[in-house]
Amino acid sequence: MLAILFGWYFRGAWVRHKVEKRKRDFLDQFCDYLDSIATSLAVGRNGYESFLTADDDMKELYEKGAPIRYASGRLTEGLKNGRSIPDLLREMAEETDCSSVRTFGEIYQICSTAGGNLKHIVGDTRNMIIEKIAIEQEIQTVLTGPKNELNIMVLMPLVILASLRVLGGGIITDDSSSMLVNTIALGIFGGSYWLGRKIVDIRV
């Protein structure tokens, strides 16, 4: 039972870590993507050419398998098939689950429809994302201690139960009442951990 719980916990934590890391990597790379688009717009290229150029730049900057290369490649393919940039940015935001891409797509659509300086819009969006990343990093630094304490607190009951089972000399039994109490206790600790993670999960 305990082995299953340990396996479930660490497997879930590892998956969440990989997902969050990929999101952070994509956001960092998306800043370079916007920088390339802004540069292309500054030298007189239109939106279509700027996004194609940005895709080429991403291929040079990042190795195959990088999140931005996949997202940019999907957008470029859509452009070549005649689809609109706002629609493709909306799809990119949904696939990457990135609010910054969603915001950029909405601003780009408004700017394209009502008129506006795309170069400044792209540059301002890039600066906004960089500031957001910096704030999130500061928050994560402050919360590192509480998160570690929370992880230790939720693991300690499991360690104590395992120790009592091995060294308790019959204190922990396998009868139905004992299993029920253990299950309820673990459920309470699991709920407390989930609530604690929600409290320390602060996003900008």
Image: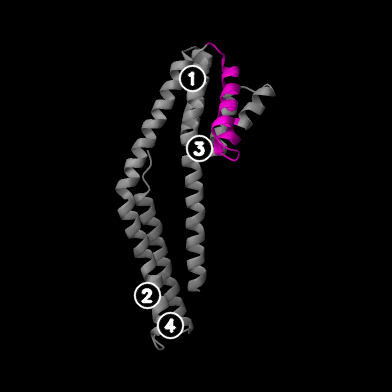
* Cα distance in 3D space between marks 1 and 4: 63 Å
Nearer the observer, 58 or 200: 58
- Earlier in the chain: of badge 1 and badge 4, it is 1
- Earlier in the chain: of badge 1 and badge 3, it is 3
* Cα distance in 3D space between marks 1 and 3: 18 Å
Q: Amino acid at mark 2?
A: Ile
Q: Report x, y in % for residue 146.
A: 31, 54
Q: Amino acid at mark 3?
A: Phe
Residue corresponding to mark 4: 166
For numbered disc 4, what is the local secondary structure?
helix
The single residue placed furthest to the right in the displayed view is: 81
Residue corresponding to mark 1: 38
Q: Amino acid at mark 4?
A: Val
Q: Which residues are magenta?
A: 44-72
Q: Are marks 1 and 4 in contact (CB under 8 Å)?
A: no
User: Mark 2 or mark 3, which is nearer to you?
Assistant: 3
**Is 10 situated above or below 83?**
below
Q: Are marks 2 and 3 in contact (CB under 8 Å)?
A: no
- Earlier in the chain: of badge 1 and badge 2, it is 1
Residue corresponding to mark 3: 26
Write the residue at 59% across / 41% down. 65
For numbered disc 2, what is the local secondary structure?
helix
Name the mark on residue 160. 2
Q: Report x, y in % for residue 147.
A: 35, 55
* Cα distance in 3D space between marks 1 and 2: 57 Å
Dot 4, crowdedness within 10 Å: few (<14), some or many (≥20)?
Answer: few
Q: Amino acid at mark 1?
A: Ala
**Is 81 situated above or below 178?**
above
User: Mark 1 or mark 4, which is nearer to you?
Assistant: 1
- Earlier in the chain: of badge 2 and badge 3, it is 3
Write the residue at 48% across / 29% down. 32
